[in-house]
Structures are given as structure tokens and as C-alpha cells.
Image: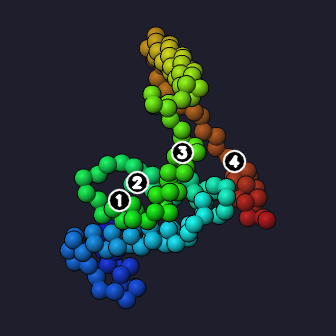
Amino acid sequence: MSKGALTRILLTRGQPPLYHLREVEAQIYRDAKECLNLLSNRLGTSQFFFGDTPSTLDAYVFGFLAPLYKVRFPKVQLQEHLKQLSNLCRFCDDILNSYFRLTLGGISPAGQETVDANLQKLTQLVNKESNLIEKMDDNLRQSPQLPPRKLPTLKLTPAEEESDSLQRLSP
């Protein structure tokens, strides 16, 4: 967000504008921590945000929280704050354990077979597309190059022009 846009937002909320990058960064972190607190409050002790089954909101929130929760950063205020919110950490762990089960080797054997099959299909598709593009390129290079044709323009007679303009005016 540009500094000017942020200043306008702050002024409309009755707050003084921010003049330094540190102030802007501090405000962003305050807002993000408030967002995490609100999510934690909404989740409460439930497994998911709207009951016992996951919803689109659960997937959306998980998409933002999981990297912040699992990726190792040198020192991140938000990560430290998230780890203090035990219900959001439990939320991430539950989804990871339920929907992203991994074996010691990384991916479960059945999952690995599916990944291998999909990778093989993708490789075949890319090879076919590559061959097709190569053939099209060869055909274009071998075809004779003709200058572009001029399309003839049709001129209307005065009577046709008048009837055409009347048709455009009528509803």
C-alpha cells in the first residue's frame, strides 16, 4: 500500500498520519496481531471455525497460518505471537495431521504412486506439446510468405446510406 493511501485511511479513521517506515511497520504488525487475536477468539475451543467440518474459511485461514506456524524464521514477531495462541496452533496441527499425513520418507506410499503417475502423465503431455510446437514452427518456416491481402471496402450508394442511417435511428 502506498504511503499516501495509508495516510488517507488513517486520516479518515481520525488517526494522525504515519511519517516514518518504522511507524508504518509497527502499525502493520499491530493490525496483524489484532487479526490473529480475532481469529483465535472466533475459533475458541472448536475444531473448525463453523463447527465440526472444515469450510472454505478454514482452508483460507490455514493457507495463511500454516506457513507462519511451520516455517522457521530467524525472529518474527507474528510467529511468536501465533505460537502464544494455542488454539490456532492446534487448528494448524489438526489440519496437517488429518489432511497432510506423511510417512518418514516424506509422502505415504499410496500418495507417492499417485504423484509418480501424475508426474508421468504431465511429462508425456509436455513432450507432446513440445513436439506439436516444433512441427508448427517447422511448417511456418517452410510455408511461402505472401504479402498481406488488402480487403476490398464496399461503398454504399446514397440511397443505401440513407436507409442505413434510418435503421440505426429507429428503435
Residue at left 57%, top 66%? Answer: 45
**Residues under numbered marks 1 and 4 in contact, where contact means CB atoms less than 8 Å apart:** no
Q: What mark, if any, has residue 157 been given in the picture?
A: 4
User: At numbered mark 4, what does the secondary structure look like: helix, strand or loop?
Assistant: loop
Cα distance, mark 1 to mark 4? 76 Å
Cα distance, mark 4 to mark 3? 78 Å
Question: Which residue does the numbered mark 2 point to in the structure image?
Answer: 69
Residue type, label 2? Tyr
Q: Is residue 52 above or below residue 101?
A: below
Displayed quadrant of residue 81: bottom left
Q: Is residue 131 visible?
A: yes
Q: Is residue 149 visible?
A: no
Q: Which badge, 3 or 1, comes first in the chain's sequence? A: 1
Residue type, label 3? Asn
Q: Position of residue 88 (x, y in %)?
A: 48, 61
Q: Which badge, 1 or 2, comes first in the chain's sequence? A: 2
Question: Which residue does the numbered mark 1 point to in the structure image?
Answer: 79
Q: Position of residue 130 (x, y in %)?
A: 48, 18
Displayed quadrant of residue 25: bottom left
